[in-house]
Amino acid sequence: MGRREHHAASLELLETHVGPLIVPTLVITEVTYLLGSRLGANAESAGSESFIDVTNGALWSAQLFDVDQGPVDFDPESDRWPLVVGLGSTPAYETMRRFVATIQQPDLASRLTDALGGCGAFQRFHTELSRHEREYTRWHRFWDDARLGRARAWLAERGYQSNPQL
């Protein structure tokens, strides 16, 4: 099965599945990267709200509750459902800036720095970087580490700890 078939199967599942999807962390990371690269600041809009079910790690957009599509056992007063508020594009932009500082090729670093200026910075950054396979692969790892680090810090600030048994 090729990429297009996998994308079609994934889209069908997302459009037809009822209830929460339990998704591995690395899949969530890749999806958030994809959204960020395609939608830029709109991917993690400042002030957007979601709830995490700490019993299983499922993330529920608050918009689902507005149309009665949230889980039936949702209780906003429970410690089971911490609210997650989107930070907007600033953390993603800062991650790109930090990555550029690690690039050893001065010409590429300069082009990426230029790409980060003004509207469309996310798309220009990814377009330029995608032309350099080794750096693009390194970027994905860097991005994953940064996103997971922010998620872990957010959870730790609220007293949650990872469970290596899961």
Image (cartoon, helix red, strand yellow):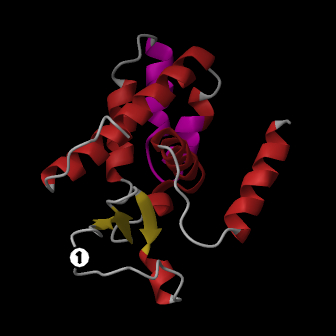
Residue labelled with disc 1? 78
Residue 82's place in the image compared with 152, above or below, is below
> Measuring 41% from the left and 65% from the top, which residue is drawn there?
45
| Residue 97 pos. (x, y %) | 35, 34
Query: Which residue is nearer to you in this view: 154 or 19?
Result: 19
> Measuring 57% from the left and 15% from the top, which residue is drawn there?
134
> Dot 1 surroundings within 10 Å: few (below 14), some, or many (20 or more)?
few
> Measuring 45% from the left and 69% from the top, which residue is drawn there?
60
The quadrant of the image that shows the N terminus is top right
- Left or right side of 103 for 153: left
Main SS class of the magenta portion in the image: helix
Query: Which residue is nearer to you in this view: 109 or 23?
Result: 23
Which SS class for mark 1?
Answer: loop
| Residue 113 pos. (x, y %) | 42, 31
Question: What's under tag 1, amino acid-wise?
Answer: Ser
Residue 67's place in the image compared with 25, above or below, is below
Question: Where does the magenta region start and end?
Answer: 106-126
Residue 45's place in the image compared with 72, above or below, is above
- Left or right side of 2 for 36: left
| Residue 86 pos. (x, y %) | 35, 63
Residue 121: say if magenta. yes
Q: Residue furthest bottom?
A: 67
- Left or right side of 43 for 77: left
Query: Which residue is nearer to you in this view: 124 or 55?
Result: 55
Among the 4 quarters of the image, the one containing residue 75:
bottom left
